[in-house]
Amino acid sequence: SAVISQKPSRDICQRGTSLTIQCQVDSQVTMMFWYRQQPGQSLTLIATANQGSEATYESGFVIDKFPISRPNLTFSTLTVSNMSPEDSSIYLCSARLAGGTDTQYFGPGTRLTVL
Amino acid sequence: SQQGEEDPQALSIQEGENATMNCSYKTSINNLQWYRQNSGRGLVHLILIRSNEREKHSGRLRVTLDTSKKSSSLLITASRAADTASYFCTNAGGTSYGKLTFGQGTILTVHP
């Protein structure tokens, strides 16, 4: 298994500002992902974080709004830019471990409230 | 779509009873994974069952997979109040490159 940590665990932000969420995995990973869970909804994939290159975004998500970095194998950041109340969600990172396993582990999530 | 669809949407039982949740999917899979999410928190991985497996156990959990019907079930035996959570099935098959697609989940409430 893997331990995935996220910082911050929660935040309350003002409209128009940006927040960067960090994700750290304690094991070697192959793939890292970022998900969003809006209130009362299921998880939606935002993007695949690629090491040393631009993230691969899903339909409806763009780099200008959700810039993602992954400078090394076990660390990634997601920035929520120019926030509005509609961005209030839980943001979760996940990772697939190296070694051929298909199991995907999730971080504890970051609960974001935008006023 | 690789999306799993859980059924029922909500399930309410008494402590000690068994809880069964079902999942259906649309395309071929390499494996299917079940997750639990306690209110507003991260997802906890429960069990992964591969497409060539029919049944798998982990503690009080039993998962079955029927690839001919494109369905899976999660059985929690002797439920506890701490099992109260949302349960999701998902899979990463074919060309999804590890990306998981989630349904709405089953909200399980276990009353003490």
Image (spheres, rainbow, N blue to C red):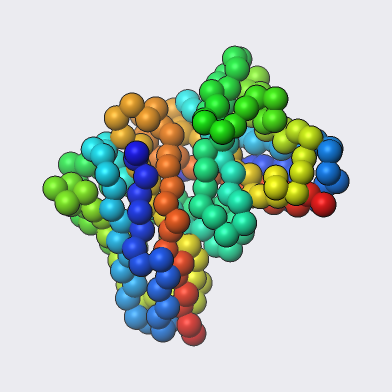
Horizontal arrangement in the rendering, residue B25 relative to residue A31 (left or right): left
Q: Residue at x 23, y 38 (%)?
A: B28
Question: Hey, which residue is sitting farthest top in the picture?
Answer: A53
Image position, residue B42 (x, y; %): 57, 52
Above or below residue B8? Residue A83 is above
Total of numbered circles in the picture?
A: 0
Q: Quadrant of the N terminus of chain B?
A: top left
Image position, residue B97 (x, y; %): 39, 27
Q: Is residue A108 visible?
A: no
Q: Residue at x 64, y 49 (%)?
A: A90
Q: Quadrant of residue B14?
A: bottom left
Q: Is residue B24 visible?
A: yes
Above or below residue B13? Residue B27 is above
Horizontal arrangement in the rendering, residue B46 relative to residue B31 (left or right): right
Q: Residue at x 37, y 45 (%)?
A: B3
Q: Residue at x 65, y 20 (%)?
A: A71
Image position, residue B75 (x, y; %): 30, 66
Q: Nearer the viewer, residue A47 or A93?
A: A47
